[in-house]
Amino acid sequence: MSEEIILDVKDLRTSFFVDDFEVKAVDGVSFKLPKGKTIGIVGESGSGKSITALSILRLLEKPGKIVGGEINFKGNDLTKASEQEIRSIRGNEISMIFQEPMTSLNPVYTVGQQIRETLKVHQGLGKEQGMEKGVELLKLVGIPSPQERIKQYPHELSGGMRQRVMIAMALACNPELLIADEPTTALDVTIQAQILELINELQEELGMSVIMITHDMGVVAETCDYVAVMYGGKVVEYADVKTIFKDPKHPYTVGLLNSIPRHDIDVDELEPIRGSVPSPKNMPNGCRFAPRCPFATDLCMEELPDLGDVSDENLVRCWIYSERWDGDPEVKEHGPKRTT
Amino acid sequence: MNAEQASSEVTQVPKVDSPLKRAMKDFYNKLKKNKTALFGGYLIIFLIVVAIVGPYLTSFNPSETDYSVKLQGPSAEHWFGTDHHGRDIFTRIIHGLGITMGIGFFSTLIGSIVGIFLGIVSGYYGGKIDSVIMRLMDILLAFPGILLALALISILGASLQNVVIAIAIFAIPTFARIVRGSTLATKNLEYIDAMRALGASDIRIIFKHIFPNILSPIIVQASLFIATAVLSASGLSFLGLGVQPPSPELGAILSDGKDFMWDAGHIALFPGLGIMVIVLAFNVFGDGLRDALDPKMKN
């Protein structure tokens, strides 16, 4: 591969230790992110996608701990970095934006003071320079009359505005990697589109790589180059974005796609995925998705499949595509069907 | 360009005050609505001015005795009368105001600084540190305030300094608890996570981001605690364990007067009123602050 890989996550394992019990929230996640590209991490609540993001920046709260694997960022393993090293990376080389713009800004400081703070911590900029750069950043994220806005408090701004400010803060030090944890979930649809467009534009302009964490396939289609579908703390399918939409292989991916409305065909009723995500405290022994999977066999229930090449484009964790598949040969032939 | 055009030009540019100025204005506007609080605030300012300027204006010396005029009632010359040593009560109260309020102020200041530090550390780091600090606070809280102060003074010895220390020590757990609770609520908010994600250190997060957000309960508690501290200081002086004679602390003057309650009630009455006015001012002001700083009562 000729592309430069900026982030290489290998077999990341993150667990929460509650009452001597290990809850495996992220269980062996691997992915590579080339420079300037976007990877989407998709999954339901509890699939471990946010924990993966927090693990990369080592922002886990106490019962949570990275128990194994590597997070190679530009050749350095972040799991082994000291607290000080990781702090100088946070906000500087890797930034993160959160899903709640309404509460992600400190209410007692003005927008300007908060942007300045990041600049001060990482670049040692003084008040005047910080202010100048702050206005520039607000302009960059499309906030009108930035000179006035920079003196306002968060409560004086709308949700969309605040998310723009958050993005401005995250971009303050020209990070090489931006982690966006459901950046549009709390916003209404028109604002969502604007924010996604903004992230896309900025990415092109600044040449950042982006990890987009979402449960929304629409967001994936709009922003991502690659997609990792997560379920029960594991990646179940990994492919580029076109392949995921055109030729999904894993029954879970297919289920996700079937559960959103489509424009190309007339569907009377959406097909939900039955059941809910298993509690991480008692994960199934076999395939994590087996209890909800319409094609599951005894093999699926008992043994966990590997993440393997199925075609040139997809990596899939499913028994259907293995030689040991003991279910309906029809399914193996055509794969799980999307609604038609 | 005519005048009308010019004025419309001006209105197009929104005028934005500096953030601090706006915050202060906002705060004052809210406080203004609460008449009693505003009254308490002005009373405090008045008392502070009197305590600072007053001693230079009185015509008597607070500790100068003059037995020719002892135990006299209020008169044109001695406004609040004289005590059993012939000292002018008015002068003594003016001088005592500073001492009494000073004790209240400094003991609250010291106690709150220590309490805030312990509370923030406790709330932010949690775990073992939290358990140890809070159990220590529980031990302090187990004693009634004045009893604890009494015990401490009997160990340290009676003096102005030790009264301040004793009251400061019993202020610590009150502040530590409030601060810990607010810190716990604040540290889980998203903007603290966001700050960590932007690379801020623990110290920076604690002092720059958590502390200003928990300031309002601290300010309210401080203004209310000054009232308690003043009462305790006067109580200790009354019991003879506080400021030593001939210092004109209000509680001490009151204590002097208790032997002459029937013959010269004014000796006890005026310092008592003085204590009451101070306590009332801080209490009313503290209550008003609580309302004004309550974010739910925006505008």
Image (spheres, rainbow, N blue to C red):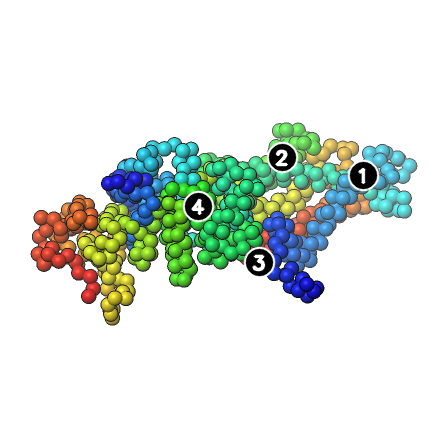
Amino acid beneath label 4:
Leu
Of residue B37 and residue A216, the one placed in the foreground of this image is A216
Question: Does label 3 or label 2 sit earlier along the sequence?
Answer: 2
What is the count of numbered marks?
Answer: 4
Residue at left offset 48%, top offset 42%: A118
Amino acid beneath label 3:
Lys
The image position of residue A282, as x and y in percent, is: 24, 48
Q: Secondary structure at mark 2?
A: helix
- The reply to whether dot 4 and dot 1 touch (C-beta < 8 Å) is no
Q: Residues within 10 Å of mark 4 (few under 14, many from 20)?
A: many
- Residue B298 image label: 3
In the current view of this chain or complex, which residue is farthest to the top? B156
For the N terminus of chain B, give its image quadrant. Answer: bottom right
Amino acid beneath label 2:
Ala
Residue indicated by mark 4: A171
Quadrant in which residue A53 is drawn? top left
- The reply to whether dot 2 and dot 1 touch (C-beta < 8 Å) is no
Question: In the shown orientation, is residue B116 left or right of residue A101?
Answer: right
Q: Label 2, label 1: how many angstroms apart (C-alpha)? A: 27 Å
Question: Does label 1 or label 3 sit earlier along the sequence?
Answer: 1
Question: In the shown orientation, is residue A225 left or right of residue B195?
Answer: left
Residue indicated by mark 1: B55
Question: Does label 2 or label 1 sit earlier along the sequence?
Answer: 1
The chain to which mark 1 is attached is B
Q: Label 4, label 2: how many angstroms apart (C-alpha)? A: 51 Å
Q: Secondary structure at mark 3?
A: loop
Residue indicated by mark 2: B166
The image position of residue A313, as x and y in percent, is: 20, 49
